[in-house]
Amino acid sequence: MKGDESTLTLKEYLHKHGIPITPFAVRCGLSFHKVYNILRGGTPTLKTSVIIERYTKGVVTCEKLLPEKLLREIEEEKNDHYS
């Protein structure tokens, strides 16, 4: 993907870059609780996932953040819409 950095989970990204939850949340425009819940296994919204993917420049992807079932539903909707 980008240089020597492949995709990471949000937890891995924060740890690798030494970024605490609060500064990360503030920089992304998200609440501390929203980021904390994701780190604890909660499911983010699609909008939150996109915000994180953009902020991390694609290192933490929506695919890493969203459950497989939701990703399949999104893909099915896209296929239905374009067929």
Image (cartoon, rainbow, N blue to C red):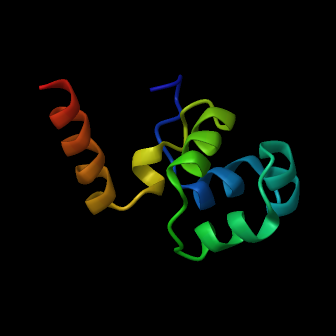
74 sits to left or right of 45: left
13 sits to left or right of 8: right
Q: Residue at x 50, y 67 (%)?
A: 43
74 sits to left or right of 13: left
Q: How many marks?
A: 0
Q: Is residue 3 above or below residue 10?
A: above
Residue 69 in the image: x percent, y percent?
A: 26, 61
The image quarter containing residue 15 is bottom right
Residue 53 in the image: x percent, y percent?
A: 57, 39
Front-lying residue, 57 or 30: 30
| The N terminus - image quarter | top left
Q: Residue at x 50, y 49 (%)?
A: 46
Q: Residue at x 59, y 77 (%)?
A: 40
Front-lying residue, 4 or 81: 81
Q: Is residue 33 above or below residue 63?
A: below
Q: Residue at x 47, y 41 (%)?
A: 7
- Point out the residue furthest to the bottom here: 40
| The C terminus - image quarter | top left
Residue 51 in the image: x percent, y percent?
A: 64, 41
Q: Is residue 37 above or below residue 28?
A: below
Front-lying residue, 5 or 27: 27
Front-lying residue, 56 or 19: 56
Q: Is residue 40 above or below residue 75?
A: below
2 sits to left or right of 37: left
Residue 6 in the image: x percent, y percent?
A: 47, 37
